[in-house]
Image (cartoon, helix red, strand yellow):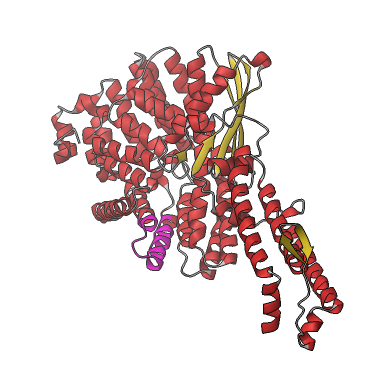
């Protein structure tokens, strides 16, 4: 071995190998730095690396056989000294043939590996997506300039305006890090490969799109692209029309921001949950359950099919149960069982006060199981607190309603103190504060809910509904209507938003078109719910609108029609009391409120501060009914 090393040294093979290694390293470094500037695909860099690897054995062969002198390459002279026989073998034709054979084998093996890993067509697609995604964070986002596909390029200004407005609005979402307008301006060439552009910009998500149509009717396509794989996470078309081009742009941008934000939010949430799983099969079961939950949401909110949604949720609960059994330390499957139980409890009615109490109690048990697995888990605390609020609002706490409310508030405040991003907890806290008549503080909690869920992926419906109700409590009809209308637009099959709009009209009333609108809303709520109770309550709201519109006989006739159909509990009394106030029949209104509070005593503080009952505030009988709750009416 010493003689072989000496011969390698004499023939300067080591020096040649060292020089080649330095040169190859320099070439690879320069290539990986310079080529992305020209936006060439990643396989070019891999090809250069492959060539450098393949060249190494060839350099060793050349260094063995030749010397590089001032006169060029010359064959290495044989040592004239008398070497031992084994050294002579090293210098023999047989050894050289063996060496050449080894070099060829090594070169062939290196070439095959390079082909399979880097150069073979489709090799990049075979790369593990998780490795590619690991280096690019989906929260790092670039909005590419939208293409103008209008005839004659007449909408290029609008395409640019939408792009720049999207950059501005998405930059305001705290979880995202968005490349600036100047950062994306140089990359407007549509031929640039997505994966190369993503790596040049250092982003895991790209937003691209196009604009077409005319100035008063616009079609915008918005696409969210995975920077690592080039796959589309989202592709939506947004239609807009109108004469005000700025309002049209703002409307399109707002809808695009919501779509992109929700898609990214779901991706980030999925990664967070996945990182906690330790069992692959449990993760697969969990994923299947999640897909079923999404299907149930579609059935419920988009199609209005609560029966099918309930069956789908039962299957989802079974999958979450299997996942929880396979991974006993993983808390998310147990939490999801609790959320499924709460959702199923609300399928019997859109009203939060008529949820199934048995399913709510099972949801609390799942929350407590999650807390046993992970003490102090903020989502588990939020789940338990939210369900306790549900029970409190329905009056299902017996004589311990105040205890139930106090425990719910403790859970919710601890949840948001641990994690301010618990949007559901903020919503439930706002609802609890509303029930106590603390409207100003409830509005603050509702605003926190909106900030906690900027993507509106977790509690969108609840946040929108609570915002509409809080502003209605405060008497700000304009804001209440705005959030209610937004909820109706986003959830066309959800009856609570047209019902809320009807309540707004019942408080302020109107005439002409307002009366027609009230009847149309009542028909929608009745059709969507399909329950006699919905018809009765909707009719009472219409009666209030008629009363404010100066049609007392019509209002009275509607009330009598409802009463002849039979009563349906305390809420009939509550809404009929509103009609009686609008008609000026205060004593009859107080009779109804007294009966209502006998069944729902926890609502005393709310009624004391609700502007609906302002005409009764100075009435001694009303003051006795609400008692000390009327003190500090500002909340």
Q: Does residue 530 appear in the picture of this structure?
A: no
Q: At 16% across and 36% down in the image, what residue appears? A: 630
Say left or right for 267 vs 89: left
Say left or right for 28 vs 595: right
Does residue 110 belong to the magenta stretch? no
Q: Position of residue 78 (x, y in %)?
A: 78, 75
Most common SS among magenta residues? helix
Which quadrant of the rendered structure holds the C terminus?
top left
Which quadrant of the rendered structure holds the N terminus?
bottom right
Q: Is 477 drawn above or below residue 268 in the view shown?
A: above
Q: In which quarter of the image is residue 576?
A: top left
Q: At 24% across and 55% down in the image, what residue appears? A: 403
| Of the pair 493 and 117, the residue shown nearer to us | 117
Q: Is 513 drawn above or below residue 330 in the view shown?
A: above
Q: Is 485 drawn above or below residue 459 in the view shown?
A: above
Q: Does residue 47 appear in the picture of this structure?
A: yes
| Of the pair 379 and 399, the residue shown nearer to us | 379
Q: Is 345 drawn above or below residue 623 in the view shown?
A: below
Q: Magenta residues?
A: 360-381
| Of the pair 40 and 83, the residue shown nearer to us | 83
Q: Position of residue 587 (x, y in %)?
A: 22, 27
Q: At 58% across and 13% down in the image, what residue appears? A: 216
Q: Residue furthest bottom?
A: 85
């Amino acid at each position: 071995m010493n003689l072989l090393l000496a011969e390698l040294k004499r023939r300067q093979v080591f020096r040649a190998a060292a020089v080649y290694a330095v040169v190859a390293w320099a070439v690879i470094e320069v290539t990986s730095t310079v080529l992305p500037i020209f936006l060439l695909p990643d396989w070019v860099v891999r090809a250069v690396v492959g060539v450098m690897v393949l060249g190494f054995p060839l350099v060793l062969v050349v260094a063995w056989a030749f010397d590089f002198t001032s006169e060029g390459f010359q064959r290495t002279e044989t040592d004239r000294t008398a070497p031992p026989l084994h050294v002579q073998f090293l210098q023999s034709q047989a050894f050289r043939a063996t060496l050449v054979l080894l070099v060829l084998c090594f070169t062939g093996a290196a070439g095959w590996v390079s082909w399979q890993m880097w150069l073979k067509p489709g090799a990049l697609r075979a790369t593990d997506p998780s490795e590619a995604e690991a280096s690019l964070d989906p929260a790092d986002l670039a909005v590419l300039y939208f293409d103008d596909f209008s005839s004659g390029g007449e909408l290029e200004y609008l395409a640019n305006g939408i792009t720049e407005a999207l950059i501005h609005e998405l930059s305001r979402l705290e979880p995202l890090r968005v490349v600036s307008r100047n950062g994306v301006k140089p990359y407007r060439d549509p031929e640039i490969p997505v994966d190369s552009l993503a790596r040049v910009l250092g982003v895991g998500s790209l937003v691209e799109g196009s604009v077409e149509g005319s100035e008063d009717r616009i079609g915008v396509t918005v696409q969210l692209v995975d920077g690592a794989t080039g796959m589309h996470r989202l592709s939506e078309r947004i239609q807009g029309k109108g004469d005000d081009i700025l309002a049209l742009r703002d409307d399109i941008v707002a809808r695009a921001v919501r779509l992109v934000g929700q898609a990214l939010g779901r991706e980030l949430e999925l990664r967070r949950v996945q990182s906690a799983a330790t069992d692959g099969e449990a993760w697969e079961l969990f994923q299947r359950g999640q897909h079923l939950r999404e299907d149930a949401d579609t059935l419920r909110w988009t199609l209005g099919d609560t029966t099918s949604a309930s069956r789908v949720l039962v299957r989802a609960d079974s999958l979450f149960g299997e996942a929880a059994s396979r991974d006993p330390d993983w808390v998310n499957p147990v939490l999801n069982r609790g959320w499924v139980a709460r959702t199923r409890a609300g399928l019997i009615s859109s009203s939060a006060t008529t949820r199934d109490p048995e399913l709510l109690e099972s949801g609390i048990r799942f929350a407590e199981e999650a807390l046993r697995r992970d003490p102090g888990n903020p989502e588990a605390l939020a789940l338990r607190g939210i369900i306790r609020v549900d029970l409190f609002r329905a009056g299902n706490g017996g004589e311990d309603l105040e205890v139930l409310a106090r425990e719910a508030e403790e859970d919710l405040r601890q949840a948001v103190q641990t994690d301010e991003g618990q949007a559901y907890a903020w919503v439930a806290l706002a609802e609890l504060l509303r029930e106590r008549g603390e409207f100003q503080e409830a509005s603050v909690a509702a605003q926190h809910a909106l900030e906690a869920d900027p993507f509106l992926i977790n509690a969108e419906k609840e946040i929108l509904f609570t915002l509409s109700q809080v502003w209605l409590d405060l008497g700000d009809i304009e804001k209440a209507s705005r959030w209610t209308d937004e909820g109706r637009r986003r959830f066309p099959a959800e009856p609570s938003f047209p019902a809320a709009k009807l309540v707004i009209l019942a408080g302020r009333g109107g005439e002409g078109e307002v009366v027609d609108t009230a009847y149309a809303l009542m028909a929608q709520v009745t059709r969507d719910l399909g329950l006699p109770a919905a018809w009765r309550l909707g009719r009472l709201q219409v009666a209030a609108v008629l009363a404010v519109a100066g049609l007392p006989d019509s209002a009275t006739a509607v009330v009598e029609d409802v009463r002849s159909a039979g009563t349906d509990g305390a809420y009939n009394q509550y809404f009929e009391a509103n009609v009686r106030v609008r008609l000026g029949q205060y004593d009859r209104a107080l009779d109804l409120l007294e009966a209502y509070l006998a069944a729902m005593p926890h609502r005393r503080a709310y009624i004391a501060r609700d502007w609906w009952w302002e005409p009764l505030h100075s009435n001694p009988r009303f003051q006795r009914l609400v008692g000390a709750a009327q003190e500090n009416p500002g909340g």
